[in-house]
Amino acid sequence: MSESFILVLNCGSSSIKFALFEAGAAEPARQPAWNGKVQGIGGPDADFGARDVAVRPVTLDPAQPYRDALELIRRHTLRWLDGRPLAAVAHRVVHGGSKYFEPVRVDGRVLADLKGYIPLAPLHQPFALEAIEILLAERPDLPQVACFDTAFHHTLPRVEQMLPLSWSAWERGLRRYGFHGLSYAYIATALAERHGREQAERARTVVAHLGSGASLCAMQSLESVATTMGFSALDGLMMGTRTGAMDPGAVLYLMEIEKLSLEQVGHALYHGSGLLGISGLSSDPRVLLAREGEDGEIGERCRAALELYVRRIVREIGAMAAVLGGLDRLVFTAGVGEHNAAIRARVCAALGWLGVEVDEAANRADAVCIGTAEGRVDVGVEPTNEEWVAARCASALA
């Protein structure tokens, strides 16, 4: 029997990451056999790249660019497979609501449920579901598994799940769900392997998932006990284009006094705020770091954006440490967390009171351990691997 593969799709609003993992073993190998991404979907500069295909511009149908991008991935995947079968497709689905806490094989009924959660994660949920729907129509025989970013936070105690709304709101499912769960699930696995399960479970740990979206997770016994994202992926840390936590009175003001429509407010909160909104230049910290030393308005706005970005991370790490009753380990992950030494250095410098100390050379090298021997807190950088977690889930269910 020829070897088979699990295809993992990680769908965002303007990009699709894809990866193929070998199926059949007890669990897939950590690194994919093949992977790549389409990015810039819906814009004028879309491109495609894969491990054996240099990044190149592509033209997508402007009427249905997402469907066109999926078709592009399908063609290249079939070419790479060269007749070898797919065992399953795993999808990162951001929101499982109050119903789905474990990976689930998707049929029409499950798909209908998941569409109901689109308003809670509008940047990601509809696009993952579009991919599932297309494949359900084209290959109903092919198992599709939804893996939820909210699932890891099912261990949150009730006091962390509740919103200070009416009890009837709690009963209707208005609660704090938490996100980036596939990333946190991988980090929990990696920490147990790196430090030994007993030691890793004993450590009071805060993981900082810092990417274009960003959140923190406080872990005890390698389980989530607090997190910064809540009912939606808008809550918590300031992000690339999202506000993070904000006084709801400001939203009411925008609507009542400045007369912004619901659609305009939603666009502002999700797409026009955060690093991009304050700097007016970019949502990428690297760009702002390169320009913050300039004179004039651009330099001032870049400095202000970075200062608030770091301050919000520091404030929330302090809150996570308070929930944990102290801090033994701080772990940085995701694009900014793994690769931006300057942001890590600024965050850690403000956490010296907690016993956080950073070795400058190790930090510049993005080393696994960037803390000093004298520091009371173990500080590390751990690359995440959401696609592998999804492949493992699909392997168990397919």
Image (cartoon, grey):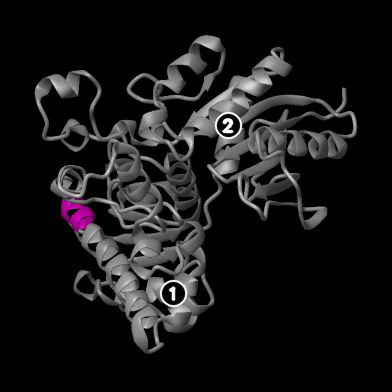
Residue lying at the far top of the rendered structure: 109
> Quarter of the image holding residue 26?
top right
Magenta span of residues: 319-325
Residue sitting at 31 percent across and 68 percent down? Answer: 310
> Quarter of the image holding residue 170?
top left
Instruction: Identify the residue position indicated by label 1 in the image.
Output: 288
Instruction: Decide whether the magenta segment is chiefly helix, strand or loop.
Output: helix
Where does residue 110 sit, x and y in percent of width and height?
A: 49, 15
Q: Are marks 2 and 1 in contact (CB under 8 Å)?
A: no
Q: Residue 371: in sight, yes or no?
A: no
Instruction: Identify the residue position indicated by label 2 in the image.
Output: 91
| Quarter placement of the C terminus | top right
Q: Total of numbered circles in the picture? A: 2
What is the secondary structure assignment of the residue under circle 1?
Answer: helix
| Quarter placement of the N terminus | top right
> Quarter of the image holding residue 319?
bottom left
Residue lying at the far bottom of the rendered structure: 295
Q: Horizontal placement of 10 versus 242: left or right?
A: right
Residue sitting at 46 percent across and 58 percent down? Answer: 333
Viewer-nearest of labels 2 and 1?
Answer: 1
231 in magenta: no
Residue sitting at 30 percent across and 33 percent down? Answer: 155
Where does residue 221 sit, x and y in percent of width and height?
A: 32, 43
Q: Is 329 or 52 nearer to us in this picture?
A: 52
322 in magenta: yes
Q: Horizontal placement of 190 versus 327: left or right?
A: right
Q: Amino acid at mark 2?
A: His
Residue sitting at 48 percent across and 15 percent down? Answer: 112
Q: CA distance from mark 2 to mark 1?
A: 33 Å
- For marks 2 and 1, the one nearer the N-term is 2
Q: Is residue 356 above or below residue 19?
A: below
Q: Amino acid at mark 1?
A: Leu
